[in-house]
Image (cartoon, grey):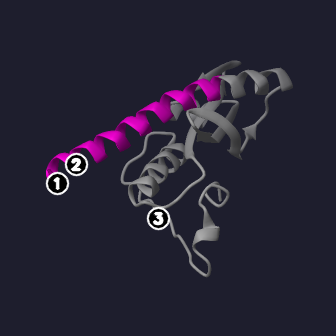
């Protein structure tokens, strides 16, 4: 669902873009990892998008907010909050996905959002590096 607002569907009337991700092994964070992988795959496939979709999760574990929780933190934490951000021009433009399991105070949600934004920018930079590396390697092969 997060990709519906990102993919430029108007360029493909009466068409469907299906995204399938097969998780072979997961510790935690499979939802966010799948979103990040799918976003890079769509760019690699040349599907026009409004920006890059980048996802991270924040969990509340023993009253402490944790970015990118491990399996134990995810399973036994008090709350889990995955985010997906639309990033365009190297800046977060909007929230494309926000889910919440558990409870957080309004102040904790604000802190979680700021933590998620910082983490998303780190992931975005990794996504961007992977895409750039792919294009450089393809260019070298064709030279």
Please tell me whether mark 3 or mark 2 is closer to you in this view.
2
In the image, residue 124 lies at what x, y percent? 50, 35
Q: Secondary structure at mark 2?
A: helix
Q: Secondary structure at mark 3?
A: loop
When the figure is inspected, residue 70 is found, relative to residue 84, above or below; the finding is above
In terms of depth relative to the viewer, which is nearer, 50 or 60?
50
> Image check: 125 left or right of 3?
left
CB under 8 Å between callouts 3 and 2? no
CB under 8 Å between callouts 1 and 2? yes
Q: Give the Cα distance between marks 3 and 1.
A: 30 Å
In the image, residue 2 lies at what x, y percent? 64, 54
Precedes in sequence: disc 3 or disc 2: 3
In the image, residue 56 lies at what x, y percent? 57, 36
The chief SS type of the magenta part is helix
Q: Give the Cα distance between marks 3 and 2.
A: 28 Å
Quick check: is 3 in the magenta stretch? no
**Residue designated by label 1:** 142
Label 2 environment density (alpha carbons within 10 Å; few <14, some 14–19, many ≥20):
few
Q: Give the Cα distance between marks 1 and 2.
A: 5 Å
In terms of depth relative to the viewer, which is nearer, 66 or 142?
142
**Residue designated by label 3:** 20
**Residue designated by label 2:** 139
Name which residue lies at 60% across and 39% down: 87
When the figure is inspected, residue 142 is found, relative to residue 11, above or below; the finding is above
Precedes in sequence: disc 3 or disc 1: 3
């Amino acid at each position: 669902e997060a990709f519906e607002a990102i993919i430029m569907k108007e360029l493909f009337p009466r068409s469907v873009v299906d995204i399938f991700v097969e998780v072979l092994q997961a510790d935690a964070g499979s939802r966010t990892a799948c979103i990040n992988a799918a976003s890079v795959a769509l760019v690699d496939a040349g599907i026009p998008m409004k920006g890059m979709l980048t996802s991270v999760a924040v969990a509340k574990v023993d009253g402490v907010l944790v970015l990118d929780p491990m399996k134990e933190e995810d399973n036994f934490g008090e709350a889990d909050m995955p985010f997906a951000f639309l990033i365009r021009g190297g800046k977060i433009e909007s929230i494309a996905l926000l889910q919440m399991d558990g409870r957080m105070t309004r102040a904790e949600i604000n802190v979680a959002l700021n933590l998620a934004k910082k983490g998303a920018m780190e992931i975005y930079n990794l996504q961007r590096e992977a895409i750039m590396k792919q294009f450089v390697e393809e260019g070298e092969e064709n030279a």
